[in-house]
Structure formats: C-alpha cells, structure tokens
Amino acid sequence: MTIRRDSAVVLSSGGPASILRPMSETIDTATVRKVADLARLRLEESEIEAYRDQLAGILAHVQHIEALDVEGVEPMAHPLDLTDRLAADEPGPVMPTADLLRNAPAVRDRFLDVPRVLGGDGSA
C-alpha cells in the first residue's frame, strides 16, 4: 500500500493497481446531511463542511485499515485475554423488611411504592 500526499490510496493485490479517490472527494454535503439525519443530529449549515472533512478523515482511516494484509490474523473481540470471574450465584442472608422499608424513598403499607410502569395511562 502506498499513501500519497493527497490521501489517495493505491492498492495492488497481484492484479492491476486500483486508485481510490481521496475520501474528501467522495463525501458531499448531501451525504453529510443524510448521515446526520440517520444519527438524529441537527447540523447548522455552517457545520456541514467541518463535518464533511471529519467524516472524510474517518472513512480515509477505515480505507487504510481495509488495505492491510490480515491473512492469518485471528479475529478477536478484545485485545487482552480476559476471563470473567463470576461469583457463585448462591442465596445469602435476607435484609430485614423493616431495614429495607426504612431505606426506601416511598413506602405504602409494607411495600415499596414505585411509579406505575404498565397500564393506567393507556400507553401499555
């Protein structure tokens, strides 16, 4: 892979070299508006060009990564070999009801009083 000053990438993989255009040339303002809409972002007109350049930079970086030879590299979910240490799921001592209710923000009779989640307002 050769990276030229204009950020174009030249790839050759045993066949004829293909030249990929600089990413800033492939991202137009309509694309930025579409991505912003999909991400539920409201962009001012003054922000469109800055985000176009940033998006082009991100995609150029991804393009460089895609050009790397990863033959024989095992996929991984995490760069470190981590093993979760889970404690045994065994019941322990139960908190006395009086202590639990004393710490609760709202109590009705001998129960925790929480806002209604389902029903009552017709939404669920």
Image: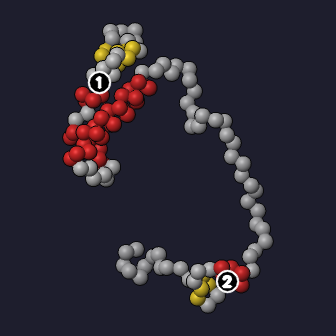
Determine the image quadrant of residue 58. top left
The colour scheme is secondary structure
Q: Which residue is mark 1?
A: 22
Residue 64 seen in render: yes
Image position, residue 14 (x, y; %)? 40, 9
Question: Can you say whether 123 is above or below 78 in the image?
Answer: below
- Name the amino acid, label 1: Pro
User: In the image, what residue occupies the spot 27% across and 29% down?
Assistant: 24
- Quick one: label 1, few (<14), some, or many (20+) residues within 10 Å? some
Question: Residue 61, image x and y in percent?
Answer: 40, 29
At label 2, which amino acid type do we have? Arg
Instruction: Measuring from the top left, give residue 97's x and y in whole percent.
Output: 71, 82
State which quarter of the image contains the N terminus: top left
Q: Residue at x 73, y 59 (%)?
A: 89
What crowding class fits label 2: few (fewer than 14 Cα within 10 Å), some (14-19), or many (20 or more)?
Answer: few
Q: Residue furthest front?
A: 46
Name the outermost residue toward the right.
Answer: 93
Element marked by disc 1: loop
Q: Secondary structure at mark 2?
A: helix
Residue at left offset 56%, top offset 23%? 73
* Left or right placement of residue 3 versus residue 95 in this view: left
Q: Nearer the viewer, residue 2 or 70?
A: 2
Picture coordinates of residue 81, whole percent (x, y): 66, 36
Quickly name the residue at label 2.
102
